[in-house]
């Protein structure tokens, strides 16, 4: 806008000067943000290919000052309003379908557990629980997800695992009162989540990289994960003023070998059923990166069109070759259909394992007791310290006394333990353990639980499907960047993190979710159960009432009448009193009563029979 | 009868020791009929583990013992597993000893009461009177009923903390029979402190205290009588309050109240047992839940009033009947309560002949006891049955207990009737009259 006003033709100078000034003053308000769109493609040796879309908006206003969130330009207003209303300092949401396989694929750019995960740092204020409840409801509407189910039963305050990812004072980040973490492991992520996510993009889904996001093909993939990350970053290298960064990520993994005669060939056309027609004019950076580190090794592949240039990068000693495409350079003649063609069929080979990865599973049988085992593998030749965090729903009663950390059969004592036991129907079990992983070893964490019996209304419609337990989170700092693809914490763009000379890489990885069956009652018979149980109480009440309110007396057995005799005498009485017939209505009521009386009398007489037997 | 009593006592101890060497204790300690969330040893150990880690055991929902029990269990848990087993056998020996004392005192107590009230009895009732020889045998029967009672053995083997509750209840009964009503009231308060429901036992203790001090034909509603009731109630409630206060000081907050008494009253844990609550409240409609919880909890204690009025002359029997109704209707009943009932049952041996359906009841007990673990296995492990199967067993077991209790009460009342009116009843025309309950 500023350049537009500068290029205006002459004449009416005074007015235009005024206009220019107005525009200029606006520009300061509006044009302090920038947007970049990036796509990172990485083929894996398992035959899969990862496409990671990353859309980053950096707005040079501080999220701590809600009044500065006024004049929106690139930053989505719908999200900005939510952030300021609920005093959010940092927000991380991921919606994932499928499980990232760390052993095969290394680390993803954004690690996410199956289902939904949300963790938020709030600005210091009281009543964070209420703000969280309001926030999840607002986000639930914004992202079309069941985030409103993130109530106190599934929300925890992690003490060490989830520190702010952006700018925050040391004092603030150590205070877990302001952080909330929750997951919905059962949540199914689908098109209805992708659409609101795309709406947050400045260019929408019609032009730019986002136009590739064809939901039919994306939900065909092995794994896909949507992410929305808001944090504070530095405006410049001096870091005097904070800016707000919104990073929207979409990671999708395909297996092209299944329909390409066993070859790992991939292209935009085959993966997304579309080619790239346009670029987002609002974006400052519009790039595609393809990891070609393995291009020259078996199986060889070639890219078409030829990349603009190939970067030879080193990230903490690990060499990587990245082919870079400036999208603008490839759209002149025709649309861009990036292709990789492999010379040979894929043969399966052992991929090199990532430095740290974890597996988790349920043990035991039957529906009464069970256990959870988590194996954490360290393939590095150095020791490392990890934070293991686990959130278990209240209905699996975790026994803290059964918690063991073992390495090679030797028990390891954790440095720190944060265990918060669950309260029934109120809050979950929260476990955070800090311990050491020895070099080239497997560490086993085990604990046992007892299944609770729920009320019949607490079961989901498909009760025998089981209940999901959210992923455990393993956090550590790696000394090497082997298979590490995440954006460095200090920068915003993927481009800037390919080359990195630091020696510590923060890693957070999620294990599998668990599916645990609980014993179920018979849902079809609440009435029967109420009737039967009340009958038993009535037996006791009736007998005790009888015994305590009556006395034993001697009576003549011959004078006691049976049912027939009583009925006879009743009808005789009727005949003897014809005046009763005058009012038929009145007659009915007492006769009914008499009948009831006779019945109860008969019962009594039966009991008397029983009594007399002794 | 001293020798057979001693032999059966020793046999009982040896039986428990021997069974502790088998795999039975592990199996029993997971059986929901034997241990409840309130009395499970595993849960108690979990609470202690949290306590040692500096986490309040009451912040979670696994541990529900009172702070005093936390202290006692903390002391016991320091020993090796084998020693703990020995401690539980020792606790059973203590229970047995108290039972012996109770049987002994009870005999004397009954003879004494009979001597004072024999003048009111019908001349024909002579043969119904208790004789000293019969009462001498009581110790033997009680010992047998305790030593070889499968419910008591199971409770001991499962290391259920219900044994502590049982010991205190037995002590309360023993002190009451001995005439130390105030001490008895303190024990009642202690039992109430541990498991809440026994608070109603202060009624028989109060009546007994009044009966002991009664002069002449003083009525039950006499001001002197009311003062004596209030004395016992005062002792009970003051000692209970002191215990709660000390617990608060020990734990540091009142958070143990919702975790123990709130847990007993609110029934949030729906783990199956042989009581009436679990399935009823699993299947309850949400908006009726509070109402029915109130109804079922009132049902536990409501019998105190009619029974206290009817059995005002017999506080010992009233004590037993209330103990029985608590055992049937409490929110988390276990075999510990049933074991106590059966151990004390021989005290009313002289009533047996007036009971009507002993055979049916005994059969129901046997069938339920055998079938309960089978149905549970079929539901939880094999998956070939559902919750209704186990529910049926728990209903039948409760019914059996109810039949037993009402039958015993019936027999007791009938015997009293015969004592006062003789057992020969002729109508004016000379035919035999029938004895029936009439209003």
Image: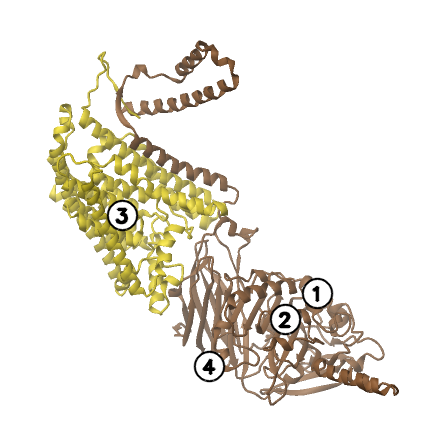
- The quarter of the picture where residue A533 lies is top left
Measured as percent of width and height from the top left, residue B124 is found at 15, 23
How many angstroms separate mark 4 from mark 2 (CA)? 32 Å
Tell me if label 3 and label 2 are in contact, CB under 8 Å: no
Q: Is residue A360 visible?
A: yes
In the rendered image, the residue lying farthest to the front is: A14
Residue positioned 44% across, 75% down in the render: A434
Residue positioned 67% across, 84% down in the render: A321
Supply the letter of whichever chain is yellow: B
Which residue is identified by label 2?
A227
How many angstroms separate mark 3 from mark 2 (CA)? 60 Å
How crowded pointer 1 is (Cα within 10 Å; few <14, some 14-19, many 20+) is rated as some
Q: Is residue B7 visible?
A: no
How crowded pointer 4 is (Cα within 10 Å; few <14, some 14-19, many 20+) is rated as some
Q: Which residue is at the front of the view, B141 or B299?
A: B299
Q: Let me know if marks 4 and 2 both belong to one chain.
A: yes
Give the secondary structure at mark 4: loop
Q: Which mark is residue A168?
A: none
Give the secondary structure at mark 1: helix
Q: Earlier in the sequence, mark 1 or mark 4?
A: 1
How many angstroms separate mark 2 from mark 1 (CA)? 13 Å
Q: Is residue B264 left or right of residue A178?
A: left
Which residue is identified by label 4?
A383
Q: Is residue A311 left or right of residue B378?
A: right
Which residue is identified by label 3?
B152
- The quarter of the picture where residue B354 lies is top left
Which residue is identified by label 1?
A195
């Amino acid at each position: 806008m500023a350049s537009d006003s500068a290029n205006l033709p002459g004449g009416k100078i005074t007015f235009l000067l005024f206009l220019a000034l107005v525009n200029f003053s606006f520009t300061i308000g509006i044009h302090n943000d920038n947007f970049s769109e990036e796509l990172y493609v990485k083929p894996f040796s398992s035959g899969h290919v990862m496409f990671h879309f990353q859309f980053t908006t950096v707005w040079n206003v501080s999220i701590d000052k809600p009044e500065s969130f006024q004049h929106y330009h690139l930053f989505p207003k719908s999200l900005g309003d939510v952030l300021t209303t609920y005093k959010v300092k940092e927000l991380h949401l991921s919606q994932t379908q499928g499980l990232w396989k760390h052993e095969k694929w290394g680390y993803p750019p954004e690690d996410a557990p199956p289902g939904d995960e949300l963790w938020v740092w709030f600005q210091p204020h009281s009543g964070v629980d209420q703000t969280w409840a309001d926030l999840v409801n607002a986000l639930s509407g914004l992202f079309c997800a069941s985030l409103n189910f993130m109530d106190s039963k599934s929300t925890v305050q992690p003490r060490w695992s989830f520190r702010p990812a952006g700018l925050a004072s040391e004092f603030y980040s150590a205070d877990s009162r302001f952080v909330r973490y929750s997951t919905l492991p059962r949540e199914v992520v689908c098109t209805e989540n992708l659409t609101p996510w795309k709406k947050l993009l400045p260019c929408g889904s019609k032009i730019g990289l986002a136009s590739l996001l064809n939901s039919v093909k994306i939900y065909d993939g092995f794994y896909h994960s949507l992410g929305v990350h808001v944090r504070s970053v530095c405006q410049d290298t001096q870091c005097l003023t904070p800016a707000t960064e919104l990073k929207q990520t979409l990671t999708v993994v395909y297996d092209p070998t299944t329909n390409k005669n066993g070859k790992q060939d991939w292209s935009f056309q085959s993966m997304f059923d579309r080619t790239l027609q346009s670029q987002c004019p609002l974006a400052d950076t519009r790039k595609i990166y393809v990891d070609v580190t393995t291009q020259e090794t078996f199986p060889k592949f070639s890219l078409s069109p030829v990349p603009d240039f190939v970067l030879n990068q080193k990230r903490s000693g690990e060499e990587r070759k990245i082919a870079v495409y400036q999208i603008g350079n490839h759209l002149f003649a025709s649309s861009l259909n990036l292709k990789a063609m492999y010379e040979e069929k894929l043969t399966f080979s052992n991929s090199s394992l990532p430095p740290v990865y974890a597996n988790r599973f349920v043990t035991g049988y039957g529906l009464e007791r069970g256990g959870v085992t988590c194996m954490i593998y360290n393939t590095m030749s150095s020791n490392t310290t990890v934070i293991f965090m686990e959130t278990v729903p209240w209905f699996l009663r975790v026994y803290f006394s059964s918690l063991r950390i073992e390495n090679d059969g030797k028990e390891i004592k954790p440095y720190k333990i944060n265990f918060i036991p669950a309260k029934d129907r109120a809050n979950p079990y929260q476990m955070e353990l800090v311990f050491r992983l020895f070099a080239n070893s497997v560490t086993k964490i085990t604990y046992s639980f007892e299944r609770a019996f729920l009320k019949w209304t607490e079961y989901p419609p498909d009760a025998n499907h089981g209940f999901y337990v959210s992923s455990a989170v393993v956090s550590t700092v790696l000394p090497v960047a082997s298979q590490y693809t995440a954006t460095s914490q200090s920068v915003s763009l993927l481009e800037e993190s390919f080359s990195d000379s630091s020696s510590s890489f923060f890693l957070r990885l999620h294990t599998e979710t668990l599916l645990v069956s609980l014993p179920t009652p018979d849902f079809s018979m609440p009435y029967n159960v109420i009737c039967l149980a009340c009958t038993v109480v009535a037996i006791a009440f009736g007998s005790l009432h009888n015994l305590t309110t009556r006395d034993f007396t001697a009576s003549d057995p011959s004078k006691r009448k049976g049912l027939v005799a009583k009925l006879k005498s009743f009808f005789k009485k009727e005949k003897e009193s014809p005046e009763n017939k005058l009012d038929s209505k009145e007659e009915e009521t007492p006769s009914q009563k008499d009948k009831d009386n006779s019945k109860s009398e008969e019962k009594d007489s039966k009991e008397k029979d029983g009594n007399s037997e002794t | 009868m001293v020798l057979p009593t001693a032999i059966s006592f020793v046999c009982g101890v040896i039986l428990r020791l021997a069974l502790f060497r088998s795999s039975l204790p592990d199996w029993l300690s997971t059986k929901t009929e034997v241990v409840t969330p309130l009395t499970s040893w595993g849960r108690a150990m979990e609470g202690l583990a949290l306590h040692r880690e500096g986490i309040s055991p009451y912040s979670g929902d696994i541990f529900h013992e009172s702070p005093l029990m936390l202290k006692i269990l903390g002391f016991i848990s320091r020993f090796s597993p084998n020693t703990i087993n020995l401690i539980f056998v020792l606790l059973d020996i203590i229970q047995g000893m108290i039972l012996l004392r109770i049987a002994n005192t009870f005999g004397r107590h009954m003879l004494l009461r009979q001597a004072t009230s024999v003048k009111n009895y019908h001349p024909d009732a002579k043969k119904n009177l208790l004789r000293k020889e019969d009462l001498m045998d009581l110790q033997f029967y009680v010992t047998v009923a305790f030593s070889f009672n499968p419910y008591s053995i199971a409770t001991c083997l499962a290391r259920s903390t219900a044994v502590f509750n049982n010991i205190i209840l037995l002590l309360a009964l023993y002190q009451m029979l001995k005439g130390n009503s105030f001490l008895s009231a303190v024990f009642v308060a202690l039992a109430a402190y541990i498991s809440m429901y026994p608070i109603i036992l202060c009624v028989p203790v109060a009546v007994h205290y009044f009966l002991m001090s009664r002069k002449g034909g003083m009525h039950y509603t006499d001001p002197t009588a009311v003062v004596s009731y209030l004395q016992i109630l005062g002792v009970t409630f003051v000692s209970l309050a002191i215990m709660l206060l000390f617990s608060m000081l020990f734990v540091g907050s009142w958070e143990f109240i919702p975790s123990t008494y709130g847990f007993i009253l609110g029934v949030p844990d729906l783990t199956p047992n042989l009581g009436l609550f679990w399935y009823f409240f699993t299947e309850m409609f949400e908006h009726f839940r509070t109402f029915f919880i109130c109804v079922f909890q009132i049902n536990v204690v409501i019998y105190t009033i009619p029974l206290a009025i009817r059995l005002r002359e017999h506080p010992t029997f009233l004590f037993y009947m209330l103990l029985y109704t608590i055992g049937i209707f409490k929110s988390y009943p276990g075999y510990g309560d049933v074991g106590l009932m059966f151990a004390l049952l021989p005290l009313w041996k002289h009533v047996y002949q007036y009971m009507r359906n002993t055979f049916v009841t005994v059969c129901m007990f046997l069938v339920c006891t055998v079938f309960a673990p089978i149905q549970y296995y079929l539901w939880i492990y094999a998956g070939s049955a559902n919750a209704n199967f186990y529910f049926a067993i728990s209903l039948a077991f409760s019914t059996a207990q109810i039949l037993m209790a009402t039958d015993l009460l019936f027999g007791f009342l009938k015997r009293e009737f015969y004592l006062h009116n003789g057992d020969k009843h002729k109508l004016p025309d000379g035919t035999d009259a029938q004895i029936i309950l009439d209003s």
